[in-house]
Amino acid sequence: MAKQLQAIRGMNDILPEQTPVWSWLEDNVRHILSRYGYREIRVPIVEYTNLFARGIGEHTDIVEKEMYTFSDRNDDSLTLRPEATACCVRAGLQHGLFHNQTHRLWTAGPMFRYERPQKGRYRQFHQVSVETFGMSGPDIDAELILMTWALWKKLGLDKHVTLQLNSLGQPESRKKYREALVAYLEQHKDALDADSQKRMYTNPLRVLDSKSESTQKVLENAPLLHEYLDDESRDHFERICAILDKAGVAYEVNQRLVRGLDYYNRTVFEWVTSALGAQGTVCAGGRYDGLIEQLGGKPNVACGFAMGMERLVLLLEACDLVPESVRTHVDVALVTFGDVEAYSMVLAERIREQCPEIRLLVNCGGGSFKGQMKRADRSGAEIALIIGEDEMRDDKVTVKSLRSDEPQVTCSFEELVAEDGRVGRLIK
Ligand code: ATP
Ligand code: MG
């Protein structure tokens, strides 16, 4: 027998059992975004490779080793997007969105990174990515954080995530810090892990992020980023903190928080949970004022974040926060016996027309009455409608409760869909 076909490692099917949770999460995200006035933008999942090389930074993990890059038939180098920020900036530049305008945008969909697959880390994963353009004040940075906080509250996640916050300053002040950091790291080079010894020269701030214990020990006495902050960045940071304080959003200032992408300046933040093991960051972002210019546009400011949807789904499940009603997909199941095919199909249509909110599943393909009832029960439906030859002759329906011991009744279509009828009552 031929070998079973398999999906690519780290690329997951999301099965019908799981999709309701995804849809529920996505609906909540979309609802919050619309309440803050954010608009959707959709961008391709494949771009020219140089967009990411230039946008994300040559010496980042993503560009150095995680991209899915290939040549197309025209020998152009293309890449499956590893993130969406660079794509949104490219789209904004191409369509002139940045001329004297502000934008609050979001986009959602799959991202691709060649990483070692493990829980919470996949090669195809999904992000909701939120990008704002043209607003330089700390108010928009704070709005992004308040908006995510509102989402966590709506989902019941507010007790399960904490906010880490930092400022990276402006490129000039960061450069001075970088020099001080490299000078310090050079003195302790032997105690650093191999990766950090390499990164120290290519992307020294990433050393702060190292998971190695010996490197972390060295970092205990390293120069602190905030000692090098320029006054304006310090003011910007303090004003964000003031808004969060006033709003009652708790945060931890973490001076070692740097992000894996080069384009950030000033604000960076992460929402982190301890419930998912090593893959604890569910949402991360910050300010990227230099990116538009870096990609060839006129200088313009920007700020945004991305949420990892797989990690949020895992967290919602782990914390048991998904309402049971989310998982049901049927309210009413219709089962038949005898020669009533046309009658029952048309009756189902009449019910759907009369009660557009009701989700009605018709048993197709026959089967024993017992088998049909079993399937009706498994569907999660509240009630079963039973149509036999007697019902057809009298133009009636028999209703059986599947979730309570309310007695079985036989009634007319009008009685069934009336406000207090057995189907009518299910309309929320
Ligand atoms: P990490 O430190 O976990 O590798 P990152 O800094 O690479 O994350 P970003 O590029 O900022 O992550 O992406 C934002 C969010 O997308 C992350 O916080 C995470 O929730 C999610 N994410 C990133 N990479 C993956 C992945 N390979 N699989 C699943 N989710 C991911
Ligand atoms: Mg990563």
Image (spheres, rainbow, N blue to C red):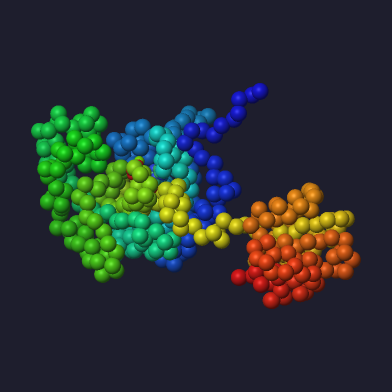
Query: In x, y percent, where is residue 84?
Result: 41, 47
Which quadrant holds residue 52? top left
- Ligand 2: which quarter? top left
Question: Which residue lies at the image location 64% right of the left edge and 57% below the top edge?
Answer: 380
Which residue occupies 10% across, 33% down? 187
Q: Residue furthest right?
A: 393
- Does 414 appear above or below 188? below
The percent coordinates of residue 43 (x first, y second) are 48, 48
Q: Nearer the viewer, residue 413 or 9?
A: 413
Q: Nearer the viewer, residue 40 or 256?
A: 256
Q: Quadrant of residue 408?
A: bottom right
Work out whether residue 281 can be spotted: no
Give the residue displayed 64% in from the left and 63% down from the top: 403
State the image quarter where residue 333 is shown.
bottom right
| Residue 167 at x, y percent in the picture | 22, 53
| Residue 32 showing in the rendered view | yes
Instruction: Answer with left or right where residue 409 lies relative to residue 97.
Output: right
